[in-house]
Image (tube, coloured by chain):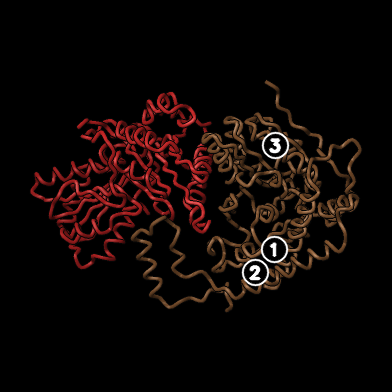
Chain colours: A red, B brown
Amino acid sequence: MPVMNIIQAVNDALRLQMRAEPRTVVLGEDVGKFGGVFRATSGLHEEFGAERVIDTPLAEAGIIGTAIGMALYGLRPVPEIQFGDFIFPAFDQIVNELAKFRYRSGGQYPCPVVIRTPVGGGIRGGHYHSQSPEALFIHTPGLKVVAPSNPYDAKGLLLACLRQNDPVLFMEPKRIYRASKGEVPEGDYTLELGRLHVTRPGTQVTLIAWSGMVSIAEEAAAKAEQAGISVEVLDLRSLLPFDIDGILTSVKKTGRAVIVHEAPRTCGFGAELIASIQERAMEHLEAPILRVCGFDTPFPYTLEHEYMPNADRVLGAIRQTLEW
Amino acid sequence: MVAVQAQDDLRRVLDDEGRVLPGARVPDVSDEQLRRIFDVMSLIRIMDDRMMRLQRQGRLGFYMKAIGEEATHFAVAPLRPGDWVYPSYREQGAWFWRGYTIKDFINQLFGNVADPVKGRQMPVHHSANWLNLVSISSPVGTQIPQAVGSAYAAKLLGKDDVSMVYFGEGTSSTGEFHVGMNFAGVWKAPCVFICRNNGWAISVPREKQTAAKTFASKAVGYGMPGIRVDGNDILAMLQVAGEAIDRARAGDGPTMIEALTYRVQGHSSSDDPSVYRDPKEPELWERRDPLNRLRNYLRHRTLWDESWERELTERYNQEITDALAAADKLGAPPLESMFEDVYEDMPWHLQEQKAWLLAQARTRSPHFHG
């Protein structure tokens, strides 16, 4: 089985789908000859031509707005927003239009657009190249939000997104685009949306993470193990809908949970997870559920590694929940 | 390359009395087509009058009239059924012309169980995929890049379908207008942009929307022709729309049409124009009323008589009365429908919320008096 990084896995999924489904088109800034600033669409322009791998004018609202019209007409557009931080000029098109078309038309106009965008910090990108805006989109009825953490999941989840009929925001962890490597099947496969993956089984504390924070959670779990603490790590993979059954199975077993996300703490997705868990599993909880998050500040440049959750902070939260 | 220029001169065929102007070229429209346009234009006028009265009686939450602007709706007339239309919210005629029925229209306003959009949107936000009429959105301008996307898609799939998109002159101030026009120009998309310049964006006059001399002149910056037309002159409207559609279908790219018209009454049932504009202004425009001009033109051509108009007026009034009576008897969409069509398949969290709601005592909707 070939070893790929996340960029190669995304590229492979796009290529397979474009070969299988001629109505699939890729559009965005620099996605054509250049193959995208992260090279996720590399080689697609050569294979599928400028009409299906479209270098658009530089305007995010136009990229998403035209992708909507393409989808309504019958294409399967896969727009790329170059950085998650640049998605906001298209916020209205995503939140009020894309996510609402099926509903507001009484089911007449499904709008299958899969938006790919890199998210997260740790690349010396400062505020405008580092944000994790998932909560804003999870709060949007009509959208699905998917956030893979590794090459195998990235390919299988992206292919699954491209073969269902709802709009999706597919968030890719840019810090580990190339650092995360793993075996990826050459051929076609899909992973079910809405299902988490237990990346490390354990018994004492449930650690919940997604995207770039899964590797931090794994690192913290390994350190905990050395200290004699058994931690179960859940990679959520799908954020909307999220796998409540999988979360509850784990938390009912361990009685303790820590949630790790890069995004700011207040109204971050961790808050929703905590609410959902305590509503359903209060009697199983041995301690308050803790969060290790980004701070409620804009994403800083020089101090970015102080801003982002790390394994030691996560380990601290694990200890805190055990000592409560 | 031929330099693209805006035509700042106003294209007109009819004078204010409905006579063909000297030297004007009359578009090739059959007598039957012209009579059908008069028929549908009359329906808009009748429907608007009846629905606004209903709104004033408190039986309808909201309504928007098109009085004085109806001729602009018939830019869709030269389209083929396979072409796509992205309306704004004041093009009732485009809907009726393409086959949207009085029943569909009224059921949507009522948001009842027979509403084509299942009670999901406030009045006048229609959607009809069987007619390639795209769901209406309240935030203005969002439909512009979407129409360009459909036009591009048709081109990519090797079809010769055209997209047409409507918006008001106020919307030309939005980012989406710029973005949509720019993408269309670059992609040479088969798209026709209809700017209904009715002079007023709620209370803000056109002078406060742009420092440009005309809205059509904006087209130059996007590498497409901008045509200015008397939007109350049905023959001129049909002519410029037909030319733009032909141009798009032939692969020659997009066109922007500025249809100069006037919003004779309020923006919506919630508006009161007496607060912000001179009451003499609408009086001036009533003399250029598009329905009167078409009627006069047809009369000069002996294609109109009083008994025909009386018959169609009575017929439409009766159809509206019947549709209202039927709509009154229909209840709200079923409670569980609130959770449908958010996604293709209902995810667990919506199933859970639906089950919870169905277990509660039913709240009686103030929209229904049954």
The answer to whether dots 3 and 2 both sit on one chain is yes
Which label's residue is closer to the chain start, 3 or 2? 2
Residue drawn at x 20%, y 63% is A285
Q: CA distance from mark 3 to mark 2?
A: 38 Å
Q: Amino acid at mark 1?
A: Ser
Q: In which quadrant of the rendered view does residue A11 lie?
A: top left
Residue drawn at x 37%, y 69% is B355
The answer for which chain carries disc 3 is B
Q: Residue A48: horizontal and vertical position, in percent?
A: 42, 28
Answer yes or no: is residue A212 visible.
Answer: no
Q: Amino acid at mark 3?
A: Ala
Residue B1 circle label = none
Q: In which quadrant of the rendered view does residue B138 lie?
A: bottom right
- Mark in the foreground, 3 or 2: 3
Which label's residue is closer to the chain start, 3 or 1? 3
Task: Write down the residue under mark 3.
Answer: B244
Q: Element at badge 2?
A: loop
Which label's residue is closer to the chain start, 1 or 2? 2
Q: CA distance from mark 1 to mark 2?
A: 10 Å
Q: Are marks 1 and 2 in contact (CB under 8 Å)?
A: yes
